[in-house]
Amino acid sequence: MDCPSVIKFMFKSLFELQWIAGFLLGCSFIAVIPALPNFFLLLCLFFSSIFLTGLSRKAQTFFNRPIPILKAMSLISSGILFGLCWVSLFSHWQLAKKTPESINNQQHIIEASIVSLPANYPDYCQFLVKVHDSTSGLLINRTLSLSWYAADCSLELGQVWRFSSRLKAVYGPINQAGFDYERYMFEQAIHGRGYIVNSDDNQLLQSQPIVSLDSLRQHLFQQLDALDNRGIFQALIIGEKMHISTKHKQLFQQLGISHLLAISGLHISIIAGLFLYLSQWLWARLATNNWLKRIAPLQFGIITSCLMASLYAALADFSLPTQRALIMWCVVSFGLLSYQKLAFYQSISIAILLILLIYPLSVLSVSFWMTFIAVWVISLVLMGRKSRNKRKDWVSSCSWILELLKIQIAITISLFIVSLLFFQQASLLGLVVNIILIPLFSFILLPSIFFAVALMLLGMTAPLEWCDELLSYLFNSLSAFDIQQSFLVFNVYLPTFSAILLVIASFLLYLPLSKLKYPWAVVFVLLAVLFWKPFTADFANPPARAPYTVEVFDVGHGLAVLIYNREHAVLYDTGFATEQSSAAYSYLLPSLRRLGVRQLDALILSHSDNDHAGGAQILLQQLAIKQLVAGKWLENSLFYQSGQQAIDCNHELSLNFKGLKLTSLHPNTQERSTEWQGNNSSCVIKAEFDTHSLLLTGDIEKEAEWQLATDNDLYERLRSDVLIVPHHGSNTSSTYPFLKRVAARYAIYATDKYSRYRLPHHKVISRYDDLGIEQWHVGCLGQLTLNMDSLQMTHQRQQKRVWRAQPCY
C-alpha cells in the first residue's frame, strides 16, 4: 500500500465513531492520572496509536474473514492512546506557562490589559489580566488573577494598566468533594494569581476603546447591575455569573435546571434556532431572482444562524462553554445539509472531536459533560424513532409531543446521574420543571430578555424592568415549594465508576437495538449498585463499636470541623459566606454527602464571625439538625429564622453520645455579658473519645486563654491530645501558659496557606516548636482526616493530580 493511501486511511479513521469514543476516553484520563507521562513515553503512545490504527485496516482480512470486533477494539485503543498523548502534551504546555515558584512572593511591575469584567466585593475587587510587559520576562503573555484591596476599584474591561503586584502560588482549598480551585485555574488556563500593592506605580496607561466589544460588554454589565436579578441577566446576556446569589444557585440546582444559568448549548441553540427559522422564512419569500435562488433557504438560514450564534458567543467573550456550544451548533447545522439519515449523529461526533483537538482540557469541565451527554442522548433517541404516520389524525398530530417528552425523560435520567457524580445532589423535579420551564424559557423569556436589552440600548428601560419583575415573581413562586424535603431530591455520593456504568446502561436503553439490550442494561445497573455499596455509609445499621473520625475541612481562612462515626455527627463551625459564595455550599455540603452524613446531631457555632458562622444559614436549610449550640448573639442574627431553639454555650453545657462526650469549657455564664466579647466569647469545646481528646477553641485570644489556664477546676479537663490552634495562629493567641496546660501532641492551623493576614504568625509557630508540638496546616495539606483511635492523620494532597500543587509543611 502506497504512502498517500496510508495517510488517507489514517485521516479517515479519525472520523470513525469508535476512534472518537476512544479519543474522548483517553483525554478523560487527565482527571485521574497522578502525573504526566514523560516525552519518551508520549512518543511511544503516539506510535502505538498509529500502529493500532493500521491494525484496524488489517482486521478485516485476518483469518480470511471480516472481524468487526477486532477493528472496533483497534480503533478504540488507538483513540485512547492518542487522546492520552494529546491531552498530556497540552497539559505540559499549560503547566510550563504557570508562574514559577522562583518569582512568587516577590513584587513585580507589570503592564497588562484587563481581560475580564472586574468583580467588586465590599473590601476588594478581582479581575483577570493579560501581561504585555514585566520586570520579570517569565510573566509576559501570562494570564493572571489579581485582587486589589482598594476603596475605589474603578477598573474597566479593555483598559491597559501598569500595576505593582505581588504574586502568590496557585494554591486553593482541597476537600473530599466540592469546588477544586486549582483544577479550575488549570482548566481555565489562568497561570498565576496575586494582589495589587498600593503604590504610585499603579497607573492607567490606556483607556478602554470607545467602539469595541469590550466597551459594549462593560456597558451592558453596568446597565444590568441596577436590576434586582442582575446576576441572572448578566449571566444570560454576557456570560458573567459573579453576581448570581447563593440562594439562586441552590434553587436552580435543587430543581435540576442549573444549565439555564449560564450561556451554553441551550442558549446558543435558542438564539441560533430562532434566527434559522426567521431567516429561512424570509429568504424563501424575498429570494425572487434566479441568482438568489441558487442559495436554498435552509442554507441561508444555517449561515445566518451560525453568524448570530457567533455574535452571542462574542458577547460572552468566547468563553470556553460558549466556544464548545458554537462549534457544536455550526458543525451539526452544516452536517444537516448532507440530508443523510445519520447526519445529526455523525456531526455530533465530529463536533466532539474538534472541541477536544482545540482544547482537550474541556473534559475537566462539568458543563462539557452536561452538554455532551444531553446532545448525545438526543441523537440516540432520534436515531431510534419510528417513522411517523402520515395520516393527519389526532395521534399523528401529537407524535411530536410524545417524542419531545421521550427526549426530556431521557435527558433528565442521564443528567440526574451526572449531577449525582459532580454535585452529590440531583433532582427528578427537573423532569417536570424542564417540561414547563424550557418551553417558557426558550420561546418567551430568553427572546423577551434579548429584545428588552436591545430596547435598553436605545434608551427604553421599561421592558427590561418588566422582565426583572417577571423573573422575581417566578423565583418567588419556585421558592415557595419545600424543594429540599421533596422525595424527588436525592443527596447521595455516587462513585465515578458506578456513574459510568449507569450512563452506559441508560445509553443502551436509548439505542435502537433488539430486546437483548434490556438484560445488558440490567447487568450494568447491578454492577453499579455492587460497586456503590462499599462507598455508602449505613447509619441505620452501625457496627457494635463505631470509631470516631475528625475531619478538619479546608475552607480557606475559616474553620469547620466534623466529628462523626456511623451513628453520630457533630459539626463545629461552618466557614465563611458571602452573597455570591459560601464554604458550606462549595465544600461542606458536597463533602458531607460524600461521607454519608445526612443529618447532624449537633451544630456548634463558636461565635458570630463570618469565617466561623457564615455558612450556618445554608446548613440549617439543607440538613436535619437535632441540636443547635451557640451564644446569645444568635438571637439577633439575620440568618436565624428557622425557629429552631438554640442551646446556650456556657461552662455548664455537656452533650453525650455513644463513645463521645462534648463539654464546654468557656465562656463563663456570669462573666459573659461584661468581659467576654468578640473573639473571646468563642465557645471552647473539649471532645473526649474512648482513648484520646480534641480541644476546639474558636478565636479565643490571650485574655480568655489566661482565664482557662489559671482556672484550677479546669487543670485536668484542659489537657487534650489534639488542639485546633486558637484564632488561626494569630499572635494574639497561643500563649505559653495556655499551651503548657493543654499539653497537646498535635496542633492544627485552620487557615489559608497564602492568607492576606499572614497566618500562622512566625512567633506562634516558634512557640509550638519550643514545646515539641507537631503542627499541621490545613491550607498546606488540604482537608485533614484524623482517626481518634490511633491519631493517624491523612490529608487530601496525598491524592496527587496533574494540576495539584505539592503539600507544604
Image (cartoon, rainbow, N blue to C red):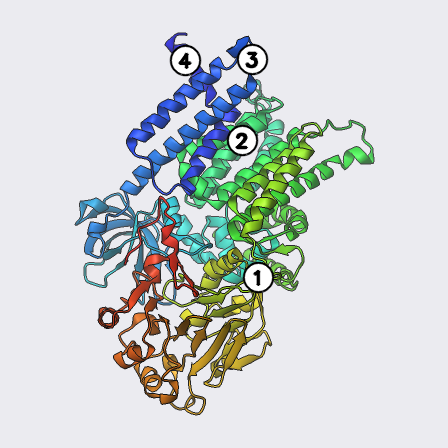
Closer to viewer: mark 1 or mark 3: 1
Amino acid tagged 3? Pro
Residue at image mark 3: 66
Q: Quadrant of residue 608?
A: bottom left
Residue 561 x/y as whole percent: 44, 67
Residue closest to the far right: 393
- Could you tell me which residue is drawn at 52 percent across and 13 percent down? 60
Can you see residue 242?
Answer: yes
Q: Is residue 466 left or right of residue 576?
A: right
Q: CA distance from mark 3 to mark 4?
A: 20 Å
Residue 63 x/y as whole percent: 53, 10
Instruction: Tell me the tag on residue 792.
Output: none
Amino acid tagged 1? Pro
Instruction: Tell me the tag on residue 348.
Output: 2
Eyeballing the image, is 366 above or below 350?
Answer: below
Sequence order check: which comes first, mark 3 or mark 2?
A: 3
Residue at image mark 4: 6
Q: CA distance from mark 1 to mark 3?
A: 57 Å
